[in-house]
Image (cartoon, rainbow, N blue to C red):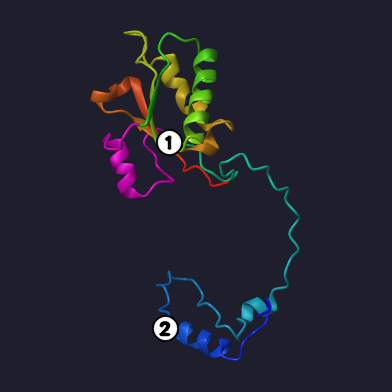
Amino acid sequence: MARGTKRPDDDALWARIAGSVKPLRRREGTAPPASAGEVREDAKAAPKKARPARPVPARSGAPRTPEEPPLSPGAAPGLDKRTAQRLRRGRLPIEGRIDLHGMTQAEAQANLVRFITAQAAKGRRCVLVITGKGLRGAGVGVLRAELPRWLNEPALRPLVLSFTPAQPRDGGGGAFYVYLRKAREP
């Protein structure tokens, strides 16, 4: 059969399938969806506005959406509740680790970008980044303080879903679990 041609029993099959579907619960204040043959009144009245064309970003293996919220330690906007809880509790298997101790900020950032990029390309999900706690009495360590900013920069943000301080057995306040996006199929 040629593509795009319609068989006589297609409409009957579609009606039977569509009749067996249960609608989802609606949130309060939302209008009911229009059925296949009807157009809602507000849709008729409002003329469609032409949207300006947006440039399509080049694929880099990870989704790039400018609307992504900035990440902060412990926040998990891209994770389901159970996975976020397992990440915070250190219950996810650590598939890679990097120790940034003793590096300058520039060295640490460059190594972090290489590490996260390589781990994401290998399809790894949970990695451990050890920053150290910093010098005693000097407050928070420089690398520890900079890690959230580095993970939110354009080179890494598309690859990272969430990060949170590690459990004491994995480095505690001187380490972070970083949860990466799934690698996209080519």
Quadrant where the N terminus is found in the figure: bottom right
**Quick check: 40 above or below 117?**
below
Residue farthest toward the front in the current orientation of the protein: 1
Q: Nearer the viewer, residue 138 or 164?
A: 164
Q: Gap in Å between the C-alphas at discs 1 and 2? A: 40 Å
Q: Which residue is mark 2?
A: 20
The mark lying in front, picked from 1 and 2, is 1
Measured along the vertical axis of the image, is residue 65 above or below residue 25? Answer: above
Q: Amino acid at mark 2?
A: Ser
Q: Quadrant of residue 170?
A: top left
User: In the shown orientation, is residue 91 left or right of residue 2?
Assistant: left
172 relative position to 76: left or right: left
Q: Main secondary structure of the magenta part?
A: loop
Please name the amino acid that badge 1 sits on: Arg
Q: Which mark is residue 57?
A: none
On whether residue 89 falls in the magenta region, the answer is yes
Residue 128, image quadrant: top left
Q: Position of residue 117 (x, y in %)?
A: 52, 30
- The residue lying furthest to the left in this view is 169
Asked if 173 appears above or below 88 in the picture, the reply is above
In the picture of the structure, the residue carrying the numbered disc 1 is 124
Residue at 53% x, 35% y is: 157
Residue range in magenta is 73-94
Percent coordinates x, y for residue 118 in the rendering:
51, 29
Instruction: Name which residue lies at 32% across and 38% down.
Output: 87
Crowd rating for badge 1 (residues with CA inside 10 Å; few <14, some 14–19, many 20+): some
Residue 111, percent across and down? 51, 19
> Quick one: SS at disc 1?
loop
Question: Which residue corresponds to the image point at 68% horizontal and 42% vertical from the top-left?
Answer: 58
